Amino acid sequence: MWFLGAVLGALLVGELHSGLWVAGALLGGILGWSVGSRARQRQEDRYRLFDERLRRLEGALERLQQSSSTLPQAEPPPAAVLPVPAAARPAAAATRLAGTVGAAADEPPAVAAAEVPAAADASLPAAAAAPFAVARPATSQAAAASPPPSGPAGMALPDGQPAPPRGRAAAVLDWLLRGNLMARAGVIVLFLGVAFLLKYSYQHLQVPLELRLMGVALAAVVLLLLGWRLRMTREAYALALQGCGIGLLYLTIFGALRLFGLLDAAPAFVMLLAVAALAAILAVLQDALVLAVLGAAGGFLAPIIAATGAGSHVTLFGYYSVLNFGILAIAFFKAWRLLNLVGFVFTFAIATFWGALRYRPEHFASTEPFLILFFLIYAAMPVLFALRAAGPRASRLDTTLVFALPLVAFGLQVGLVRDFAYGAAWSALALGAFYLLLARALWARRGEGQRLLVEAFLALGVGFTTLAIPLAFDGRWTAAAWAIEGAALVWVGVRQQRLPARLFGILLQLLAGLFQLGESSARAGAWPLLNSVFLGGLLLTLAGLFCAWLLQREWRQEPRRLRSAERLLAPLLFVWGAVWWTGSGLHEIDRHLPPSLHVNAAIVFFTASCLLFSWLERRLAWPAARHAALALLPLLLLSGLLSVGRVAHPFADLGYLAWPAAFAAHFFLLQRHEVDRPWQGDWLHAAGLWLLAAIGAWELAWSIDRWVAGRAAWPLLGWALWPGALLAVLALRGERLRWPVAAHREAYFVLGATPLAVFLALWFAAGNVLSDGNPWPLPYLPLLNPLDLAQAGVLLLLATWFSEVRRLRLPPYATAPLPPAWTILGAAAFVWANAVLLRALHHWAGVPLQLAVMLRSELVQASLSLFWTLLALAAMVVATRRRWRSLWLAGAGLMAVVVGKLLLIDLSNAGTIERIVSFLGVGLLMLVIGYLAPAPPKEEAS
């Protein structure tokens, strides 16, 4: 409704004067809001009436059932006996039934008409119902002829019973479509028509302008008189006519002043004030909120419409004081919340615009009293509204005025006292004291009856008293005081079961955190840990953790004393405190330690913090502290990632102390807090193994590289030695380590070891592709150099680990097929053997270890042909003796590749000794194969 009113008001006033369409929209919106509010109020009254009638109906039914239960039960006649005439029936039943009907006659006719047949049917047999039929009144019979509307749960509602409401939108639609719809629509159309007529007559007709305006004013008076005359018989129609008349009077005065210049500002102001007073009087006499709102809006807009720019602000605010006292006087008799809101919005909106455009420091003495007066007037209205409201609305709270008034008034007050030292702080303290005293007085007078309003005033008093601290001191003191105060409020709220106190305490801690962030720089020369920034963060930490523990303990011991949503606040507050603790500690490290020590100092800080949380978990039985203690591993992973590029190796800058201590604390915490969820513990164990492998491999590779000064293949070995050693311990001795390996077999043998095996496989491939295997300062010997030995050891280690996990039947390796695994291992061994051959040719024959050069080298091609033939010979001979048909076929396939290579590649090297050697050697070896293993085995050995 407010939107519809704003649109109509903007169209109407914009048609008259394009520059004032905003004022028209504002006035129309207020009128629409008032109309919609009235509709909602009527709908609520109708719902209350429906509820009351429903209770009466249920009570009548219950009484009727109780009385009918005392009727004698008629027994069915014997089969051989004729039915007894109606006159011969016992008179007691008829007498009893007549008494029941008489009792039902006290209820509404519709109720009685519906109840009597039910009672008769319940107390008499079906065959005897007709002789005892009770005569009904004509109205009841008429009502029974048509089906009644259905009520809740399928209950038939009596005639005239209102249907239950369907929501706010349905209520507004119901107000629009029911009642005198034609009158309401006619008022809107008539109002627009008058506006268009005024504009048209001004532009085209020759009738004197004064007569036109007088005619409109006379029509408005006629509408007012007619509405007043019909107020007793046609209430809605009469109010519509009076509202239209008031609007036409405003429109006429506005046109005479602004559009046509026929009135001066002073008489126009008096007329507007008179119209506003008339609307207020009519509203009070007829209990019409719409007229009151219309009169108040016109009264507040009158000085704006009649303004010339030369008036005094004292006169303006004095006039508004009179209007506000009038609204306050109405509030003594009528609980019209909408009227109070209209006065509040107009008063403080106009005061804000004046203050932004015209206020100067010399105006303080003449402005401050009016601000205090306006504040006191509208501070009294919520109290009057709560005291005057009746029925279900008696416990309601005018939240808009209760909470918006101090915020708006305090904002204006800060603007007035901005040139005074500590002016804002003293104003906040005075405002807080006012609300605390008001809450005390209201509680002493009304007690539990106005608990909600008292709590609201108490919260405002505490809030503004708290606000005085940051206005008088800097952010550090503010954060410290608010953190302590917030924790105290949460404690009091838990002890006294007061939800507002708990929520306000949590809000105070959030605000304290914002202030602490704004003052995050400590003074130069401040001591480590003993400075305002760290101490403020420490207080925030303690307050947050204390509140989290308090709510968690209360939820476990007395869950009914907390709301279900507060269960989520405990972990959030714990995270809040933990984040402040972590941030404060890292801030101290960053400020007081050199950059080279930042990472390792953070590792020590994380380790100590998690051990502290572990102690808190044991001391207080606090599950959240256990989760924080087990967060050490993610923090170590983050520290390891951040250290890449910052330090040369993990043990640099006291890392040899930080990392071992961190890993020891990690495994200690895992053993101390064996978690309830196995998968959670498995992942923590596995991730710890990964981090241990990564840090150890990095440190070992750096150390070896430093020993050999970055030369040869030695640094590459360091990346495989430490992960390989860990995998070897798991594969060979893992079952003997009762904790942690044997206790978490899947975590170490599967989750932890699989990434290590993949890493070693990748290292194996990278070593064969990227490294020449230079063993400096040792001479190069095939198979006996460090790289070849390490790669052979990796292959053997992977085979051992795979066999172990299959033996332990750990998924998913327990069901993995064995032949593909051995095929992959054989292919890897074949690649490694070829890499050994190529590295040997590189070191002994001087062939560059480059792919293009080796493809063109006759020596390399001849060597590969002979080497592949030897491998095929060995495979096929072994396959024949062991009856491994698949291995024989693999050797035969390799021989086919050799023959193809001879014909396609080696044959092109005409006239070279290498071609001759390769053909001769391959041919002789093929003869040996034909003698020793001429055909594949007939059966595959198991």
Image: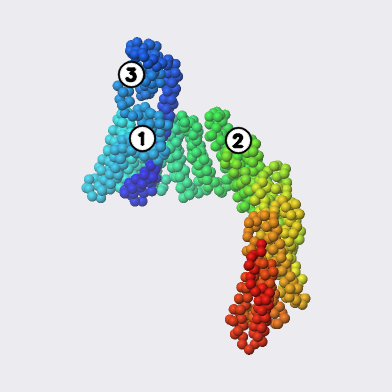
Taking depth in this image into account, of 541 and 684 the one nearest to the observer is 684
User: Is 56 on the left-hand or right-hand side of 250?
Assistant: right
Nearer to us: label 2 or label 3 = 3
Find the distance from the CA under tag 2 to the CA under tag 1.
54 Å
Residue type at mark 3 is: Ala
* Secondary structure under the numbered disc 3 in the rendered image: loop
Please state which of residues 550 and 933 is positioned toward the viewer in this rendering: 933
Please say whether residue 641 is visible from this viewpoint.
no
Which residue in the structure is indicated by mark 1? 278
Q: Which residue is mark 3?
A: 130
| Residue at 69% from the left image edge and 80% from the top image edge | 841
Q: Residue at x 50, y 41 (%)?
A: 405
Residue drawn at x 35%, y 29% is 148
Going from N to C along the chain, the mark reached first, 2 or 1, is: 1
Give the x, y percent position of residue 506: 60, 43
Q: Quadrant of the N terminus?
A: top left
Q: Residue 783 sits in which quadrant?
A: bottom right
Q: Is residue 221 above or below residue 811?
A: above
